[in-house]
Structure formats: C-alpha cells, structure tokens
Image: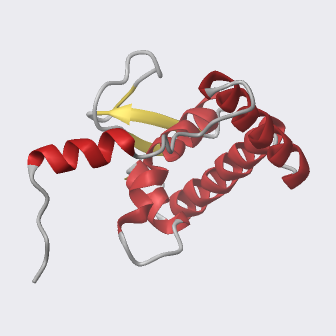
Amino acid sequence: MTHTFSPAESRTAFETAPDRRLQGPAGPADARLTHRARRASSARTSGCTLDGVAETERQLTRRLEQVIMNLLERRAATSSICPSDAAREAYEGDDEGWRALMEPARRAAWSLAAAGKAEVTRSGRPVTETDARGPIRIRRAR
C-alpha cells in the first residue's frame, strides 16, 4: 500500500527540504556569475566565437546563392523560383527542416539581387527589399 501525504505533511516536507538552487560561494547571485564564467570559458576552449557564427552564416548564404543560381540555370530564361525551392534543394534531410532555411534563402536572394545576378519579384514585378512584403520569387537578372 502506498502512502499519500496530507497537505500538512507535504508542506512540512517542502519547507524542510534543503534549497537545491544553484549556489555560489556568496549565494545565488554569485552562482549566476560563476555559471556565466564557466560558459565563457567553455566557449573559449571549444573554439565557439561570434566570428565563427558569422562565418557559418556567410558559408550558408554562399551555399544558398549557389543553389539559387543552379536552379535558375536549369529553368527557362523567363522562369522564376520560390525561395522555398532553394531551401528544399539545400536541405539534406527528408523532413520539414528545410523551413529553417527559408529566411537565409531570402537573404541569399537579396544578396544576389544586390550583386545584379538575380531579380526578386512580387506579382511578376521587381521589388526592393524594403518594399517586398509576403511571397517573393527569384528570376535571372534582365
């Protein structure tokens, strides 16, 4: 038979239990500082830096730019593609993970447009990044 605790017994057990929060030498605030210092030290030793994150983003943008240009080359000169086509092509899995590449694919499209290699359109008309709202398409520069 299992024992069930009455509300009074539960309260007493809770109130007398030791505080399990992270504690540093000078209390909880010191623990937060200690935790941050450990994380910073861990990041330094693992080679994880903001420069590394920026480099990874640049690599992803370059990869998506290549995918966009390859997709456009395989299509008719007047055809356009959706950024989701590039995201799906660049994603290597079989699940819905390509959706995480949608915003990077849009950024890659804007990067190609700025370089004059592609045009971003909405309803068949070229748009600027500040004017674009909603679905966009990408086509070869004319």
Q: How many marks?
A: 0
Q: Position of 4 compared to 102: left or right?
A: left
Q: Which residue lies furthest to the bottom in this view?
A: 1
Residue at 50%, 35% (x, y): give it.
Answer: 119
Say which of 43 and 141 sits in front: 43
Say which of 81 and 24 sits in front: 24
Residue at 31%, 44% (x, y): give it.
Answer: 14
Whether residue 89 is situated above or below residue 139 in the rendered picture: below
Measured from the top left, where is residue 13 in percent x and y? 29, 49
Measured from the top left, where is residue 45 in percent x and y? 90, 51
Q: Does the image show residue 140? A: no
Whether residue 32 is situated above or below residue 46 in the rendered picture: above
Q: Which residue lies furthest to the top in this view?
A: 130
Measured from the top left, where is residue 21 in percent x and y? 52, 40
Q: Quadrant of the C terminus?
A: top right
Q: Does the image show residue 62? A: yes
Residue at 50%, 45% (x, y): give it.
Answer: 20
Q: Position of 66 compared to 41: left or right?
A: left
Say which of 92 and 51 sits in front: 51
Measured from the top left, where is residue 58 in percent x and y? 73, 43
- Specify how the rendered protein is coloured: secondary structure
- Quadrant in which residue 95 is drawn: bottom left
Residue at 18%, 50% (x, y): give it.
Answer: 9
